[in-house]
Image (cartoon, grey):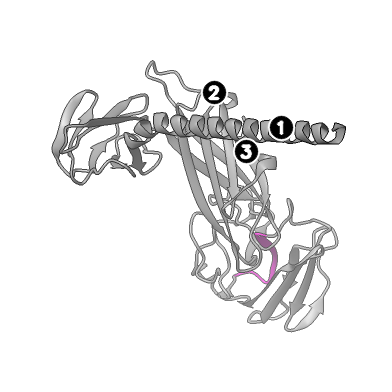
Amino acid sequence: MYSKAHNTRKRVAFLFFLFFTIAVFVHSASTSVAHAQIQLPGLLETIQLTTSPSYPAPETPVRISARSFFTDLDRSVNTWFVNGVAVSQGPGITSFEATAGPLGSTLVVEIKAESPSGAVTTARTTVRPTVTSLAWEADTYVPPFYKGRALPSSGANIRAAAVVSFMRADGSTIKENDIVYTWKINGRVAGSISGRGKSSVVIPGPLLFGETLVTVIAESTDYTYRGSATVIIPSREPYLVLYQERPAGGIAYHAALPQTSSVGDTELTFAAIPYYISTSKVKSSFLSYRWLINNAPVAADPSDPSRITLYSELPEDGALVSLSVEHMLNFLQTANRSWAIQFGGNASSPGISDPFGRVETTTP
């Protein structure tokens, strides 16, 4: 008797537990279904508005487009409003083009879609024009007063800075420390250099024959203003330019020597400039200079190996001057060039321009 009653109580307890478990499951399922039914009408009414470009500049065209996964915008009658004024209406009009205003202005764009059944769905977006640009240069060498920027050769670093103009309606601008900068290198977010107030960065440059894609997205801390800029930075090979150096006037940066030239003097000092090599000065101990005169090695000035002085014993002497420059820590940064120089004749025009404001025809 004891054993039978004991087994009966066990069966009753098991059945009670099973009933309780099923009841809890059914209640949870019914709650989930009811919750889904409550949320579904909201999803059905959703319209997404996008702008192209994503970050319009002041007084430029911007296209606003609408899409919805639940509202059939192609069959509904759509009315577009700009700052409360209807500007376009008709069946299936899912986009229209407006013009962004000046800095500090606001363009409120709204769509009202009325379905054939009479249901009305609306969506709104705000266009605030901004200006975002990228300034950059490499940590390579260019001479003083050079008009262009220092370009990266393989292995050089790049300094980039975002220049942002976020203006409010009252004319005040958002400070740099109130802007969050997201940097992307070749499409990937660089989290270590991104963040609030981080408007400038130093990044590795492109490898030999490669390029680096740099993007910055700037956003105000209150998510009101946004802007973006992208640049593609290609790798450049270093190259050499030769200039005359005179005791009175110094280096004639305005007149680069062509590969074949005549000079009026019989004693001249020449200065070689290695453009786009990673150094801050031409006399760097990391640069190796190897001069050849008529294919024979010659010693350069030990105090400044980037310079060489030539003497001509005969009025009509000529010389083939060759130079090789190599970075001691980066074997990919090398440059070689030769110049045929005729002494004692009429000084020839440089023939080609140096890189000071113009591009030399022999540059890569």
User: Residue 251: x and y, percent?
Assistant: 64, 56
Mark earlier in primary sequence (1, 3) = 1
User: Residue 10: x and y, percent?
Assistant: 77, 34
Residue beneath label 2, please? 175
Residue found 35% across the figure and 38% down from its top: 48
As shown in the figure, which amino acid type bears the numbered disc 2? Lys
Q: Residue furthest top?
A: 170
Along the line of sight, which residue is nearer the eye, 23 or 295? 23
**Quadrant of the rendered image containing residue 254:** bottom right
In the rendered image, the quadrant that contains the C terminus is: bottom right
Relative to residue 293, is residue 121 depicted above or below?
above
Mark 1: secondary structure: helix
Range covered by the magenta-colored residues: 264-276
Visible residue check, residue 282 = yes
Residue beneath label 1, please? 12
User: Residue 328: x and y, percent?
Assistant: 82, 64
Relative to residue 28, is residue 50 depicted above or below?
below
Along the line of sight, which residue is nearer the eye, 198 or 296? 198
Residue beneath label 3, please? 200
Residue found 40% across the figure and 39% down from its top: 55
Mark earlier in primary sequence (2, 1) = 1
Residue found 50% across the figure and 29% down from its top: 31
Mark 3: secondary structure: strand
**Quadrant of the rendered image containing residue 216:** top right
User: Residue 190: x and y, percent?
Assistant: 65, 46
